[in-house]
Image: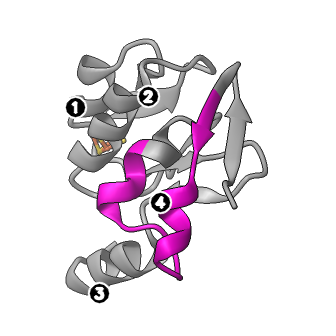
């Protein structure tokens, strides 16, 4: 049996995905990346480093809040792989990539919890 997803006119065959139970791993993210439909930034976690808005200005913008800079989603979406790279490049994992249903595709809650445990915020 073949499973496929249709998103934005692109049909993806996920039959390979059925071979391994459980959540998708990083090597399968290429498939999930095609389903990114929303971006969120955790304001308190953002340190304003600028990585995201430099990497993907279609999806992120700089927001000046006095003495600090924070990232804001533009409301638009960029290239899926670049959005993924921007989220991965965020040093505080402040960026969440979500699908149409609001499911967080990146980062995993485990990754965020591990970062929280190792930092002060
Ligand atoms: S990469 Fe992360 S920490 Fe840096 S500006 Fe973007 S959201 Fe903030």
Write the start and end of the magenta stretch as one range.
11-30
Above or below, 35 against 91 in this view is above
Where on the image, by quarter, is ligand 1?
A: top left
| Residue 29 lies in the magenta-colored region | yes
Q: Could you tell me if residue 48 is visible in this image?
A: yes
Pointer 1 residue Cβ closer than 8 Å to ligand 1: yes
Going from N to C along the chain, the mark reached first, 4 or 3, is 4
Going from N to C along the chain, the mark reached first, 4 or 1, is 4
The label shown at residue 109 is none
x and y, in percent, of residue 110 in the image = 40, 81
Label 2 SS? helix
Label 4 SS? helix
Residues marked 2 and 1 touching at CB (< 8 Å): no
Pointer 4 residue Cβ closer than 8 Å to ligand 1: no
- Real-space CA distance between mark 4 and mark 3, rounded to the nearest whole angstrom: 35 Å
102 left or right, relative to 117: right
x and y, in percent, of residue 9 in the image = 70, 19
Q: Nearer the viewer, residue 121 or 54?
A: 54
Pointer 2 residue Cβ closer than 8 Å to ligand 1: no
Going from N to C along the chain, the mark reached first, 2 or 1, is 1
Label 3 SS? helix
- Real-space CA distance between mark 4 and mark 1, rounded to the nearest whole angstrom: 33 Å
99 left or right, relative to 33: right
Q: Nearer the viewer, mark 2 or mark 1?
A: 2
For disc 1, the marked residue is: 51
For disc 2, the marked residue is: 80
């Amino acid at each position: 049996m073949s499973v496929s997803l249709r998103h934005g006119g692109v049909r993806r065959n996920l039959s390979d995905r059925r071979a391994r139970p459980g959540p998708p791993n990083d090597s399968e993210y290429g498939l999930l990346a095609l389903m990114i439909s929303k971006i969120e930034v955790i304001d308190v976690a953002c340190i304003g480093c600028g990585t995201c808005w430099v990497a993907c200005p279609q999806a992120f913008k700089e927001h000046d809040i006095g003495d600090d800079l924070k990232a804001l989603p533009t409301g638009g979406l960029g290239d899926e792989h670049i959005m993924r790279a921007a989220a991965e490049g965020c040093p505080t994992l402040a960026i969440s990539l979500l699908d149409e249903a609001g499911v967080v595709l990146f980062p995993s809650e485990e990754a965020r919890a591990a970062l929280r445990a190792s930092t002060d915020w």
